Structures are given as structure tokens and as C-alpha cells.
Amino acid sequence: MGAKNGQQKDVNGGGWRGRCALATCVLHVLVVAALAATREDLDAALDHKEDAVRDFKESLESAARDINLYNSTCEVYSACSAELRDPFCNFNYGNTRGCGCNEGRTIDARNSVIKTSPKLGASSYSVKRTACEAKHINANLTRLYSSMIELGDAKWLFYGSKDGVLINFPGIVWDEDIGENTCDTTYDARIRPWFMTGATGPKNVILILDTSGSMATYNRIDVLKRAAKAVLDATTFADFIGIVEFNNYARTYEGLTTLARAMPEFKEVLGGFIDGFNTGGSTNMISGFERAFKLVDDSNEKNYTTGCHTTYVLVTDGVWDSDPTSTITERQETHSDEHFFVVGLGGDVDAQGLKDLSCKTGAIYTQTNNDDDDESGLQRAMISFYKYYALVKTLRKVEGYSWSEPYESIPSIWGPMTTVVAPVYDKSREPWHMMGVAGVDATVCDLLQNKVPDPTGSTRTQRGCTCRETYTYNGDTFSGCTTTNWPVPWCATSGNCGSCNTESVEGGCWDDCEPEGKDGVLQEELLTRASAWCEPDSLDKCALEALRLSVGESKCGSSEINFEYASCTDADIANYSWAIDGPQDPGSTTYTLKSVQSSLKGTKYDMNADECECDDTMQPTCACAAIEEMMKKKETCNGGDCTPLHMGLFFGIFIPCLFCLFNIIRIIRRKLLNRAPQVQTNIFVQPQPQVQMTHHLTHSGGPSVPSMPVSYARAQPWTPAQTAASLQGHTYPAPSQPNYPKV
């Protein structure tokens, strides 16, 4: 009887376990189905962030009208301070030693902090104005943050002013070293990709860099290298870039004949090219410009550009061997939306000659200080072109949003981030003035895990083509995407789509592959939104004169053949100067941010996180896995040569049981989102057309693009040349996945 009873008990137990297992499987299937993201989920998530940045932007614009600097103290803490106004440990911001490694990081969710540095050159008036704006919008930022934290997606909200001063919310101690002259003094909001994206929009950027013998003086070549790479870092995946090095002759990387999309892996390659510069020879500036023009022309022919503005930035320290003026002016007769910027480097530059060149060609000239190690000054001079495009946006009253590529934030807490940005204007008078750029973060792992739908259909390419299932290249058979003889994955394409007339590829057509899986879906959507605005345009002569004054140079004054500068009145220039620089200090404003200077060690602000473990209950719950993968990637890097792991691996470590937790979180978020009030506004957002997504490294004789899919056609039709081409025989290492820059 005992044995039988025991057997009966075991049977019943087995039945219970069987039913439970079946129920678990059914629940798992239902949960997975419920968690399957759709395009509507992704749109809703990105739109939610755009609503937040719109709210942020409008608050700042209201502050510009309402603040009174002279009747307010506007006491705001510096980000480089040993204390915050209302500190508390928040588990959503990563564990630190100051919070016992188990309660998060010390932040201030009720107040902003201001990040500035003496190296920015921002006046006391500018810093106080930004601080007063932060104080004025504090209640709105707190409300905005609270509404997002309930959904688990509140991260940083920030604003960079035209002078590089940063508002950061929630408040945080920026760095362990909080000294005024040592606390991350090189940080300049204006040269960060998110700021450039919001202020300028998509653009082609060609750096024309002087490596003649005189560049060896005072190690100027080293300063140029570091500054040029900083400019590369300030470009985003919505931009196309190219570099021309010149002395006796002009060269591009590996003989490239086209620009390429500013993807992280390509910028890393160009950074290595810059590091290899050696000095010697003369200053053949004509050769440099002719090579740059050919680079752009070949890119236009193959449709490897933004289809938008083109910027040439010349950096030189010497007297040219032959005057390039006629070379440029002849170019301008047939290319109206190309803009020129000239940077004089060091104390021995022929300043007058370069100024004359600028006046005759409508270029903007800037010169660094006589200190030949003025790296920060050179960086600002090299990106002064942002003021040009910001002025174009301002005069056209361009509103709307843009998105950054995924990047590593400071501090790095949640893995890769992406940011939605919007230009902020002072609309108190005509013309408007662009005050700066506002941004709201989103965590990439959360988007990929919960918001991005799975890709559908066959393998797609950057221009919407379909990869052939199998194909031959140079007699070898391939399936799917390959990196053979090319720095990024590519495939043969079906139909007359992509780069065609390529005899070595079966069918004649090929294209770059999209990143695989959800990464590709997210990249396509972010890039589409980032590339929405483009209105090719030029500024008139009086706007150019105002820009020259804004960057600290003198006006041209006298008229040139194509530029009647003498007709500009003082009122004309003052009007444009307001649009560029905004309100100026009418007196002698003095202002100091609140800051406590003491050691952080042993305090609640001690941010040493090396001994702390990531809390996997932190929102989003994928953050710990994401940051772990980033750390693994860094540990495997050898001398900067590393292959980052695919972001899809972030989520491979999650076991099926966690789907239940994610489903609960998703339901709660949806309910809260449905209860959140919907803000209506009349803000104008530019339409978002489909865009080409290519980042080829195209060599001499490289492929042409005779046809584009209808869905990817540009607003302004382009007819490419029908030239034969073939994939080049260069051998490249396997391409890396995105290497996220710090922002």
C-alpha cells in the first residue's frame, strides 16, 4: 500500500509538473508573441523622445523671452563641484562607491548643473544667461524627468549653448577631478556630434590639410592631427566625409575617389590615415583644391554624398606656391551650394594673403593664436563652419528634430545611447537667433530589446536593394553578405539596383549590406530621421561679413567681382550679427557658478565604480548586459585595433524566464503612457524622405550607381554617368561593428 500510494503521489506530481511545464511553454510563447515589437512600437518610442525634446526646447525659448538677468542671482551648481543641491542615490544611474555600491549613483533630480571651462572663452554674461535659463525651466525639467522615469526611460536631458556652455539634467558631479582648470576642460558642447547634428543638419565635409615642411615647426603637425580627428569625431552618420593631404602633391586615403558616409569604422580608418601624416615639400594649394573638387565630383556621379551642403575646410600655415583663387572662383560658377572655410595655423601664416583669398571667394577665414600649441583654438576654428549652417537654419526658421548615431555617453552607464536633438531659438525679435541645441537621450539596448521590430523579407542593403541568394564574384561563389575585397559587408543585388555595370559581380550590380537584424532596422530609422532636413542655400554678402566679425576677424569691406561687400550697411551687418551671436552684455556682468572644491573620496559623490557590480534591476534591465559587452570590447582592443561585438549579442545572455519580467514592465509602461497627457503644439517638422544609406570606401575607378530604388530617390533628381567599374583588388581586414564615440 505504501509503495502504491507513493507511486500514485509521484504520478500526480508528474502530472502537475507536466501541466506546469506545458503552461510555462504556452505562457512563454504568448509572452514572446506579446513582446514582438512592431514598426508602430518603434515610431511611438522615438516620437515619445521627440515630444520630450520639443517640450525642453519650448521651455528654453520661453526662458529667453522671460528671464531678467539683472534682477536674478540665478544660483546654479557647477558640474565640477564636490556637492549638489539636493543629492540622493538613484539606482537607475549605475552603482558607485559613494552610494555603497548597492544604491546607485548620487544625482540631483530636482536641479540642473552647468558645465563650462575657461578654455571655452565664454563670458560671464553667457554663463549667467545659460544658468538663468536653467533656473527658469527647472520646474518643467523636473516634471518632464518625472514623467519619463515612470516609464523607465529617463536618462540625461541636456542643452549646449552657442558658446559651448552645457546644461545637464539631472545634476551630476562631472568628474573625479573637479578643479576649475582640470575638470574635463577640453569638453566643448559645440564640437560634439549631437550638437553639430542639431545645428547644421546633413553635410559633406572635406578637410584639405597642409603637410608641407613648415608644418614640422613647433610640432604644428601634431596639433593639426589631433584637431582634425576631433573634427572627424564631430561628424555623424548623416554626414559624408573626405580628407585631402597636400604638400607638393595632393593625396587621399588609399587613393579614394569618393567621399564616404561618416560611420564610426570609416572615421577610425581616416584617423589612422591622419596619424600617418609626415611633413615635407612645398605648399601646392591648387593641387589640394583640385583633388578635393574631384573627390566631390566623383561622389556626386556615384551618388555617394548627402545630396546636401558641401563644406571645404582648408588648414595651412604657409605661403602657397601658386594662388588658388581662380581655381575656386571657376568652381563656384557651376556649384552654388559649396562653401569654403580657411584656417590659418600658427604665427608665421600669410594672414593677409589668406584673408584676400577668403574675400575673393566668399570664404570665412579664421586664425589660431600665435601660440603654435593652440589646439583648442584650432578645433574651434576648424568647426566654425557650424555657424554658417546654423545661420542658414536660423534665417529659414527651420524647426524639427534629428537623431544621432549610437554613441558611448559620459559617464558610460547604460551602454550605447542615441540622442534626439532640436535647435533652440531666441524668437524675441527678427531675425531669430539660434541659442543652441537641446537633446534627450534614449538607450539603444532598450530600443533593440523592446521597440525595434525584427527585419522582414530578404537580406536588404543600404539603398533598399535585395541581396541575391547566391552569386559569383571573380569566379567564386558567395551566399549573403561578404567582406571579400571590401571594407564593409556587401552582396550582389537583384535587378538594376545599387552599383551596377560591375562585370566581376554576377548580375553586374552590388551594394553595401545593412547591419544585420534589429541593428539594421534601428539604424535605417535613425538615419532617415537624421537626414530629413536639407535646403541647399548660400548666405548673402552681408551675412558673410557678419560671420567674419563673429569669428574674430575683420570685414572684407571693399567689393570683389562676385561679392559687393561695400554695399553692406552697418544696419545690415548688425541684423545678421544678432542672428549669429544673439544678445550681448550691455554692461560688465560678473557671475560665478556655485562650486565646492574638496576631495570626493569617502563622500556620497565618490564615483569610483570599479569595485561595484551592476544592478540588473536598473532601468532599462538590459543596461548591465550592454555595458558588460562594451567593457569586453574595450578589454580585447589592442592598440586601438579592435572589433566591437555585435550589439545583438547583448541580449543573447537573457534566459527565456526573463520574458515574463519584461512583459510586466511593458504592460506597466503602456498603461502609464496611455494615462500621460498628450501635448499639442504647432511646431513645424520638416518632412522625412527616404535617403540613401551608403558608406563605401570607393577607390579610383570604383563602382558607379546608374540606378536607385524609387523609394530611395532624392527630392532633386540626379542622373549618374553609366561607366563600367569593378570592385578593386585591395584586401582589407574584416570590418568591425560600430565603435561608439563618446559624446
Image (cartoon, grey):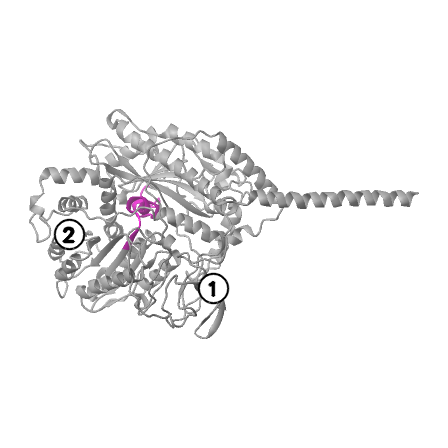
Q: CA distance from mark 2 to mark 1?
A: 48 Å
Q: Is residue 525 magenta?
A: no
Q: Residues within 10 Å of mark 1 (few under 14, many from 20)?
A: many
Residue identified by numbered label 1: 468
Q: Is 571 displayed left or right of 414 in the figure?
A: left
Residue toward you, 607 or 239: 239
Q: Name the quadrant containing residue 488.
A: bottom left
Q: Is residue 188 magenta?
A: yes
Query: Where's residue 708, x and y in %?
Result: 36, 58
Q: Are marks 2 and 1 in contact (CB under 8 Å)?
A: no
Q: Name the quadrant containing residue 496.
A: bottom left
Query: Where's residue 62, x and y in %?
Result: 30, 30
The amino acid on which the numbered mark 1 sits, given as a three-letter code, is Arg
Observer able to see residue 538:
yes
| Element assignment for label 1 | loop
Q: Earlier in the sequence, mark 2 or mark 1?
A: 2
Question: Residue at position x 67%, y 46% from top?
Answer: 25
Query: Where's residue 493, x and y in %?
Result: 43, 63
Residue segment shown in magenta = 180-204
Residue identified by numbered label 2: 362
